[in-house]
Image (tube, rainbow, N blue to C red):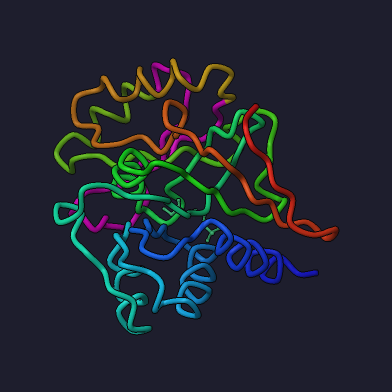
Amino acid sequence: MTQEELKKAVGYAALDYIKPGMIVGVGTGSTAAYFIDALATIKEDVVGTVSSSIASTEKLQRLGIPVFDCNEVDGVDVYVDGADEINPSLQMIKGGGAALTREKIIAAMAKKFVCIVDGSKKVDILGKFPLPIEVIPMARAYVARQLVSLGGTPIYRQGVKTDNGNVIIDVHNLSILNPIELEDQINRIAGVVTVGLFSHRGADIALVGTTDGVQTITLK
Ligand SMILES: O=C(CO)[C@H](O)[C@H](O)COP(=O)(O)O
């Protein structure tokens, strides 16, 4: 099976977690896009969605799926999104698509986070994928210097502006042995909006696409 087929398989497998009347959080990226296609097949059952990016909102609306502003809903029943890396504790690196801040907000609001990935995203230690950080533009150089002092190699993602009008710094060469500590350290740097490390609020369930089928991982 190709990587695209594995992404599609987990996108559709996530429908098992959607029940009639739910408010569904919708992620961003190529795997989440397959989930949106899947959601369209049961759209009469879905009360509504909240979306983590303008791109996902536009796709949902094109397919006739109602999208609410996060401030209009009391909570999110289930959040379905991809990841760039996921470890055995279901902590993740996210933000390859620059949507990390809205993704973190919806993850925080959600009762259940279902992460959908193809098998290439599974790692033992996070950090091979450069860690995305959303930064207020005027703080870019300062934040980069602070990241160097934490041992990383920050690279400014040229030409990218987030849906919130900010910039992205990708931090290379990190071996993230203590994700919670690093998430806290980076969050404390003035000018950082969000770090794409999802360790305090990781996933509750991971659906992993493999050539043997969709593997379900839940924390014990
Ligand atoms: O965090 C994300 C976007 O900000 C995505 O979930 C992540 O980049 C994975 O994307 P894809 O499903 O295209 O591999």
**Residue at horizontal 38%, vertical 50%?**
77
Q: In the shown orientation, is residue 72 left or right of residue 135?
A: left
**Residue at horizontal 35%, vertical 17%?**
185
Where residue 40 appears, as percent x and y from the top left, is: 45, 78
Q: What stretch is highlighted in magenta?
A: 148-174
Which one is nearer the viewer's eye here, 96 or 10? 10
Instruction: Determine if the magenta segment contains residue 159.
Output: yes
**Residue at horizontal 57%, vertical 60%?**
14
Which one is nearer the viewer's eye here, 151 or 187? 187
155 vs 17: above or below: above
Quarter holding residue 51? bottom left
Of the 4 image quadrants, the one containing the C terminus is top right
Which one is nearer the viewer's eye here, 160 or 11? 11
Where residue 92 appears, as percent x and y from the top left, is: 52, 37
69 vs 217: above or below: below
Instruction: Determine if the magenta segment contains residue 205.
Output: no
